[in-house]
Amino acid sequence: MGLPPKVFYTLHEAAARWDCTLADIAGWASVGRFDIVTAIAPVTHGMQTVAGFVAVSVTDILQMFRQGGTGPAKILLRRVRSKDQEDWVVIADPAERIEVTLADLLIMADEVRRFEADCDLLRRPASHIGSTARYDWDGMYIAQMVRIHDQGLPATQAEWLGEVQDWFVANGDSGEVPDERTIRRRLTPIWKALRGTC
């Protein structure tokens, strides 16, 4: 039995998936195409406590999405909204404001799929002359480049192989996953080059 589908995507994963910029994602979120969310510990406002995945007001953090990477790396949230609520909870006390970085910002997977359906964005495997590839190797490579950029290499090659298998499960149209030997053959030269080993 395979793993369940992804629950959320980081903004970098969504940008790689849609071949767009982070600023594009912020723009679409700012006009209500989907919510950008983050996970927070409980915050109490009056009689209301907010915790878990909460929507972030994109206009409050728009500076983070400046082109050229000149925006701040982190910012304090001034308001959040529970996923099942329409009203924003204002965090009036500066000491209680929540600091977030780009890596903390997510889009829930159901919203990613809905947005893709609304915009007719089909996840097609890379095409080759005379035939269609069975697996989306290009998409996998892009996702792994983002992962290595943001988090570095996994501790072991076996762990990395498992992550790539998870990526194919979550992103493949058919649910099929390349066999372990094929994935290892593609990852090993990259692993050796990045680890500086022979």
Image (cartoon, helix red, strand yellow):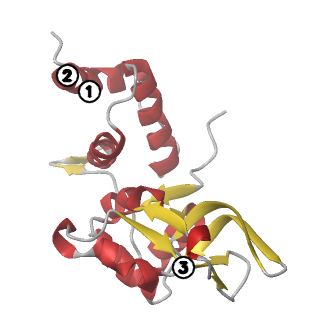
- Disc on res. 189: 2
Q: At x 27% / y 65%, what residue is drawn?
A: 19
Camera-nearest residue between 131 and 92: 92
Residue type pointed to by label 2: Pro
Label pair 1/2, CB-CB below 8 angstroms: yes
| Residue that label 1 marks | 186
The picture places residue 125, in percent across and down from the top left corner, at 32, 51
Around disc 3, counting alpha carbons within 10 Å, would you say few (fewer than 14), some (14 to 19), or many (20 or more)? many
- Disc on res. 11: none
What is the total number of numbered labels drawn onto the structure image? 3
The picture places residue 14, in percent across and down from the top left corner, at 39, 62
Around disc 1, counting alpha carbons within 10 Å, would you say few (fewer than 14), some (14 to 19), or many (20 or more)? few
Which comes before the other along the chain, label 3 or label 2?
A: 3
Camera-nearest residue between 1 and 197: 197
Camera-nearest residue between 83 and 117: 83
Q: At x 45% / y 90%, what residue is drawn?
A: 31
| Residue that label 3 marks | 78
Q: Is residue 90 above or below residue 23?
A: below
Q: Which quarter of the figure is the N terminus placed in?
A: top right
Tag 1 secondary structure: helix
Per the model, the C-alpha gap separating discs 1 and 3 is 45 Å
The picture places residue 148, in percent across and down from the top left corner, at 30, 39
Q: Is residue 52 above or below residue 169?
A: below
Residue type pointed to by label 1: Arg
Camera-nearest residue between 149 and 133: 149
Residue type pointed to by label 3: Arg
